[in-house]
Image (cartoon, rainbow, N blue to C red):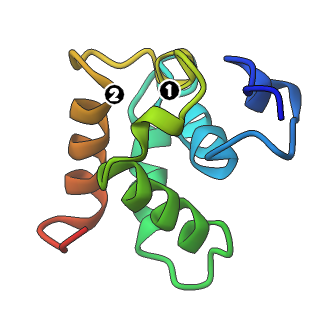
């Protein structure tokens, strides 16, 4: 099996690791998508919506990454999807978990 390309998730690769999480954070956390913070606020609302079918997969993928799965991410995939200000992928993911799920354990 070939390693996933850094931006495979952007190209619609259904086998790209953490595809759901990367797609959702790109849509809601990337600066181009979130010029007025409304996209991020929408993500927070989606995380609390039990009828949003994507969010259980998103939450599971986020949990996997926080439990040590960041080495499975394609190189620079998260940074490309989000352009975060944090120093590391893990720092961004921890903030995201806190913003979406508060003190809920991972």
Establish if 42 lies above or below 70: below
| Residue found 50% across the figure and 40% down from its top | 39
Taking depth in this image into account, of 3 and 79 the one nearest to the observer is 3
Quick check: can you spot residue 17?
yes
Establish if 23 lies above or below 44: above
In x, y percent, where is residue 14? Answer: 86, 46
Q: In the figure, residue 36 lies in which quadrant? A: top left
| Residue found 51% across the figure and 57% down from its top | 61
Label 1: state its secondary structure.
helix
Label 2: state its secondary structure.
helix
User: Any mark on residue 47, and which?
Assistant: none
Taking depth in this image into account, of 60 and 43 the one nearest to the observer is 60
In x, y percent, where is residue 22? Answer: 60, 39
Report crowding for label 1: few under 14, some 14 to 19, many 20 or more residues within 10 A (C-alpha).
Answer: many
Quick check: can you spot residue 46?
no
Establish if 103 lies above or below 84: below
Say left or right for 93 vs 65.
Answer: left
Q: In the figure, residue 10 lies in which quadrant? A: top right
From the image, tell me which residue sits under label 1.
Answer: 78
| Residue found 66% across the figure and 51% down from its top | 20
User: Any mark on residue 89, and which?
Assistant: 2
Report crowding for label 2: few under 14, some 14 to 19, many 20 or more residues within 10 A (C-alpha).
Answer: some
Marks 2/1 in contact by CB < 8 Å: the verdict is yes
Taking depth in this image into account, of 5 and 26 the one nearest to the observer is 5
| Residue found 48% across the figure and 53% down from its top | 42
Taking depth in this image into account, of 99 and 86 the one nearest to the observer is 86
Q: In this view, which residue lies farthest toward the bottom? A: 50
């Amino acid at each position: 099996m070939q390693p996933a390309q850094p931006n495979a998730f952007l190209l619609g690769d259904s086998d790209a690791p953490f595809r759901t999480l990367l797609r959702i954070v790109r849509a809601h956390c990337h600066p181009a998508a979130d010029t007025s913070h409304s996209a991020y606020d929408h993500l927070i609302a989606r995380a609390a919506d039990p009828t949003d079918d994507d969010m259980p997969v998103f939450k599971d993928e986020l949990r996997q990454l926080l439990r040590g799965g960041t080495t499975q991410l394609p190189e620079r995939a998260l940074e490309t999807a989000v352009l975060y200000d944090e120093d590391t992928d893990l720092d961004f993911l921890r903030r995201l978990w806190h913003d979406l799920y508060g003190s809920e354990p991972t």
